[in-house]
Amino acid sequence: MVNFNKKVAILQSNYIPWKGYFDLINSVDEFVIYDDVQYTKNDWRNRNKIKTPNGVKWLSIPVETSGRLTSGRSIRETKIVDKDWNKKHWDTIILNYSKAEYFNDYKEIFEELYQNCTNEYLSEINYAFLTKINDILGIKTNITQSNQYDLSGGRIERLINICKSLNASEYISGPAARNYIDEDLFKQENIKLTWMDYSGYPEYNQLYPSFEHAVSIIDLIFNQGQNSTRFMKSFG
């Protein structure tokens, strides 16, 4: 049966993203991981933030930062350069979250996930975490990857081509894309363009002050457990 009200979102993959990323996934019928674009340094692709007693700390996966990077290495082509990154990250997470109320409820899941994340490509590692966290949160959205679609044309044309391939009636975009998206191009294809609103999130109990929204979803999961979705916006 054709879905005549099909919502689609397209985002680059991030490492253990914040709650807003998962709210966007849960707001659509199809989520496309857009990894056939150039990898950007000092971005969310290979790193994210956690809370510690000394403030916010970055967890970064070491990746190749030379060679073809300047000539356009894609996220999909980006490789890991430290085979022990997963052990280091898990040790850091234990150090900072072992006293969280729900840490023990999810310890085995994340420990296994980190132990098994031995893929040499960043995008595949991000995909493994993304799908497992979706399972934890109960998100059922179908996930596909950009290399499955026609990526011809310019920046916006590629997004529209993916939407058309999926018979999308609505495209939901993150607010940062307002800087470059031409809304008229979506109107010409009869695709409704909607902007995700990340404002107004409620605070929850974090281990360490002061409260910070812009941290990895694992902070919410370890602190709120099965109640995590109460502090997200897409779960009614």
Image: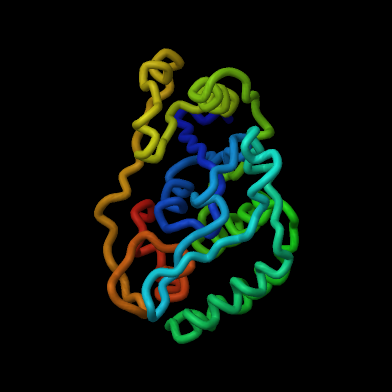
Residue found 43% across the figure and 83% down from its top: 101
Q: Residue furthest left?
A: 200
The quadrant of the picture occupied by the N terminus is: top right
Q: How many marks?
A: 0
Q: Residue furthest bottom?
A: 99
Image location (x, y in percent) of residue 80: 70, 56
Image location (x, y in percent) of residue 162: 57, 27
Residue found 71% across the figure and 51% down from its top: 79
Vertical side of 3 occupied by 56: above or below:
below
Vertical side of 59 occupied by 143: above or below:
above
The quadrant of the picture occupied by the C terminus is: bottom left
Residue found 41% across the figure and 36% down from its top: 173
Q: Nearer the viewer, residue 135 or 184?
A: 184
Q: Nearer the viewer, residue 181 or 168?
A: 181
Q: Quadrant of residue 46?
A: bottom right
Whether residue 112 is visible, yes or no, is yes
Vertical side of 228 occupied by 106: above or below:
below
Vertical side of 124 occupied by 219: above or below:
below
Q: Nearer the viewer, residue 101 or 123?
A: 123
Is 25 on the left-hand or right-hand side of 69? left
Q: How is the image coloured?
A: rainbow
Residue found 63% across the figure and 52% down from its top: 127
Image location (x, y in percent) of residue 115: 71, 71
Is 206 on the left-hand or right-hand side of 4? left
Image location (x, y in percent) of residue 222: 46, 75
Whether residue 167 is visible, yes or no, is no
